[in-house]
Image: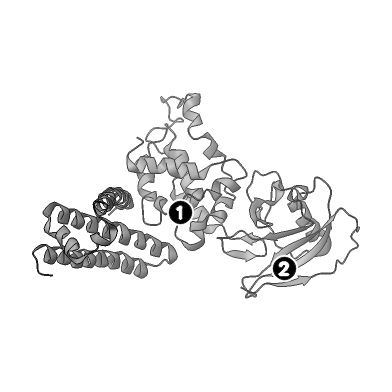
């Protein structure tokens, strides 16, 4: 794919100081463009400026047509995942100062269809997530009269707690080498969520979930590269979840 | 067949092949390497029934493991219902063909038809 670089002249005056960086933003519209181009902007930064703030500076002052998805600005919503200097990261959680570079390149996440610029399509990831039955499956309910609260010990909670921190940002799927070639692969996000509920002792849906992931593009296609765990901004370890799930399927775990 | 069963077979054939190929290599060490490749010595292996049976098992293990591995690689390269069916059945066919051809060689050498 040919990548052409275009440099845009700022329409407003930007303070030129040593505390400014060149922000390279990948521009691509799936409806009109055949390949992405890079637009370069000079952006003033402070020690605490995040990549998202730099992109929003560009949107507000230099080019309002830059497409970026964001919401909470505090690594909770999982909207602003993108490739920052080649690494999948959350733009709101990455400070410019920690990148140690005067040139910051932002691109859309890999392994997702691009809608426009930095915004990617999450449709397939959410569909896969839904397929994993991301809820407690059981006959009775805590809210039915006559039933009791489903109590768990701290040890029971610990088995799945870290996996419940997933914010569905898609960074793990974006970094997965299997997902780069196998578009039908469930992916680390879906598999980690399957484990989150399989490991929950309140849940009775283990058999159904194991059946869903035990298919030709399921859990067995993971090559344990571990990049999913490396990039997760919430400290979730999908690679470990996949190995633990394999234990259930191979009969090592009950 | 469920993928977990296929992968259990995949892992078991790998372990089995490693063990039997190790025995095969140890047998080569009973004489010089060049000697072990001489025509009469190679044929003698096939005339020893337990050894010929072990070679047959090695053939089966390596064919099953190898073609399943190739199937997995090809499934990851490209997706599509027709393509995947072709790969799955093609792997089984190739596996069966290789085992049949190898077994024929072992059998013919064993009964002295070579």
**Image quadrant where one finds the C terminus of chain A:** top left
Instruction: Let me know if marks 1 and 2 both belong to one chain.
Output: yes
Q: Which residue is mark 2?
A: A38
x, y (%) of residue A185? 45, 57
Label 1: how many Cα within 10 Å (few below 14, some 14–19, many 20+): many
- The earlier-in-sequence mark between 1 and 2 is 2
In the visual, does A5 lie left or right of A46? left
In the visual, does B69 lie left or right of A63? left
Image: A93 above or below A179: above
x, y (%) of residue A118? 67, 61
Q: Chain of mark 1?
A: A
Name the residue rendered at 49%, 35% in the picture: A160
Q: Which residue is mark 1?
A: A186
Image: A63 above or below A44: below
Image: B94 above or below A133: below
Name the residue rendered at 50%, 30% in the picture: A158
Question: Is residue A134 visible in the rendered structure shown here?
Answer: no
Question: Is residue A18 visible in the rendered structure shown here?
Answer: yes
Residue B73 falls in image quadrant: bottom left
Residue B57 falls in image quadrant: bottom left
Name the residue rendered at 66%, 69% in the picture: A28
Label 2: how many Cα within 10 Å (few below 14, some 14–19, many 20+): many
Name the residue rendered at 79%, 70% in the picture: A7
x, y (%) of residue A32? 64, 75
């Amino acid at each position: 794919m040919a990548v052409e670089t275009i440099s845009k002249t700022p329409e407003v005056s930007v303070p030129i100081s040593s505390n400014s960086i060149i922000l390279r933003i990948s521009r691509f519209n799936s409806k009109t463009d055949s390949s992405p181009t890079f637009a370069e902007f000079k952006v003033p930064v402070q020690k605490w400026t995040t990549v998202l703030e730099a992109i929003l500076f560009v949107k507000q002052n230099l080019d309002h047509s830059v497409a970026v998805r964001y919401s909470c600005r505090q690594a909770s919503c999982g909207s602003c995942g993108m490739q920052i200097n080649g690494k999948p990261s959350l733009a709101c959680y990455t400070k410019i100062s920690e990148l140690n570079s005067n040139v910051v390149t932002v691109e859309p996440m890999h392994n997702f269809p691009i809608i426009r610029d930095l915004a990617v399509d999450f449709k397939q990831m959410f569909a896969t997530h839904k397929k994993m039955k991301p809820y407690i499956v059981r006959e009775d309910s805590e809210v039915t009269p006559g039933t009791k609260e489903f109590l768990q010990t701290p040890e029971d909670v610990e088995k799945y707690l870290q996996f419940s921190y997933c914010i569905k940002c898609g960074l793990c799927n974006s970094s997965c080498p299997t997902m780069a070639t196998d578009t039908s692969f469930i992916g680390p996000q879906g598999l980690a969520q399957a484990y989150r509920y399989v490991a929950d002792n309140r849940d009775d849906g283990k058999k159904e979930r194991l059946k869903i992931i035990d298919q030709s593009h399921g859990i067995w296609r993971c090559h344990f590269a571990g990049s999913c765990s490396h990039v997760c901004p919430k400290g979730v370890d999908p690679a470990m979840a996949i190995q633990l799930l394999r234990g259930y399927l191979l009969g090592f775990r009950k | 067949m469920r993928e977990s069963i296929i992968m259990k077979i995949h892992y078991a054939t790998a372990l089995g092949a490693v063990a039997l190929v190790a025995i095969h290599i140890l047998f080569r060490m009973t004489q010089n390497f060049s000697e072990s490749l001489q025509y009469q010595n190679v044929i003698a292996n096939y005339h020893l029934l337990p050894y010929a049976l072990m070679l047959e098992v090695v053939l089966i293990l390596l064919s099953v493991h190898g073609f399943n591995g190739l199937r997995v690689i090809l499934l990851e390269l490209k997706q599509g219902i027709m393509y995947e069916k072709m790969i799955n059945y093609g792997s089984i066919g190739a596996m069966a063909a290789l085992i049949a051809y190898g077994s024929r060689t072992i059998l013919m050498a064993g009964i002295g038809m070579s």
